[in-house]
Image: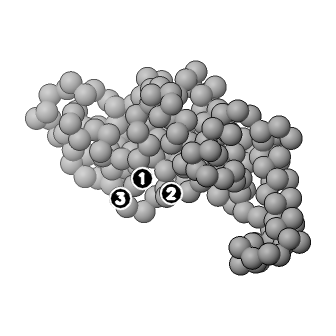
Amino acid sequence: MIVPMEVQRIALRKGYLSPGIVLGWRIAAYLEEFFDGLDLLRVQAAKESDMVFSLRLMVAWRRAAPLLLPRGNPTCDLLVYHPVTGTLLLLTGSERQVELPRHVQLLEPRLAGNDLRARTIYRSAVQSLVDRLLVARVEALCSIEEHRLRRLHPAAARVAKVRCRRCDAQVSFHHLWDLDGVLCCLRCTGLPPEWFDRQ
Ligand SMILES: [Zn+2]
């Protein structure tokens, strides 16, 4: 299958083409269509990977906010927030999709040597996984949870205190969020506090 030009550009930057790179590109394209562009998105990934490398480049090329890695334990592979529409997407299970079959993974130590058979089998397994990732529906490649999330009133009086309905912490009214109809604090939304540090 022909690999799209944009995927080739990403692979060139990385130094190789991998299933993770294709998956990151597919997810970026999905988000771009879902939100009608990537430029207003905020994205946090659970950890570095080829998928995240690819997505990070796509986000940078579309001039979106830089992709973050979390400081604490992440609950999903990717957290995507679109402040304009108040849409929060949580993507999980994506890393499993880029794993090669076990018998192919076992060939990895033999790839550096002159074992042509091992290299041929490995290359063909990577190619068939890449082909599958290029055509599969993104919804079939990871689980996608959608939530409504909006800051209640950023300009509200800072003196008023209310309780978070999730953790019961007291928070200023202007730090309150509406997550699927439940008023809660920023920590309970799961959004990285770095995004709002200066507000
Ligand atoms: Zn809370």
Q: Position of residue 115 (x, y in %)?
A: 83, 75
Q: Which residue is drawn at 51% across and 30% down?
A: 61
Q: Where is residue 98 in the image (x, y as percent from the top left)?
A: 71, 57
Q: Where is residue 45 in the image (x, y as percent from the top left)?
A: 49, 50
* Tag 1–tag 2 contact (CB < 8 Å): yes
| Vertical comparison of 66 with 121: above or below | above
Which residue matches tag 2? 48
Q: Distance between the residues labelled 1 and 2?
A: 8 Å
Which residue matches tag 1? 69
Q: Which amino acid does label 3 sit on?
A: Arg
Q: Which mark is residue 71?
A: 3
Among the two numbered marks 3 and 2 on one chain, the one whose residue lies closer to the N terminus? 2
Q: What residue type is labelled 2?
A: Glu
Q: Residues within 10 Å of mark 2 (few under 14, many from 20)?
A: few
Q: Residue at x 21, y 33 (%)?
A: 199
Q: In this view, does 196 lie to the left or right of 160?
A: right
Q: In this view, does 124 lie to the left or right of 87?
A: right
Q: What element carries label 2?
A: loop
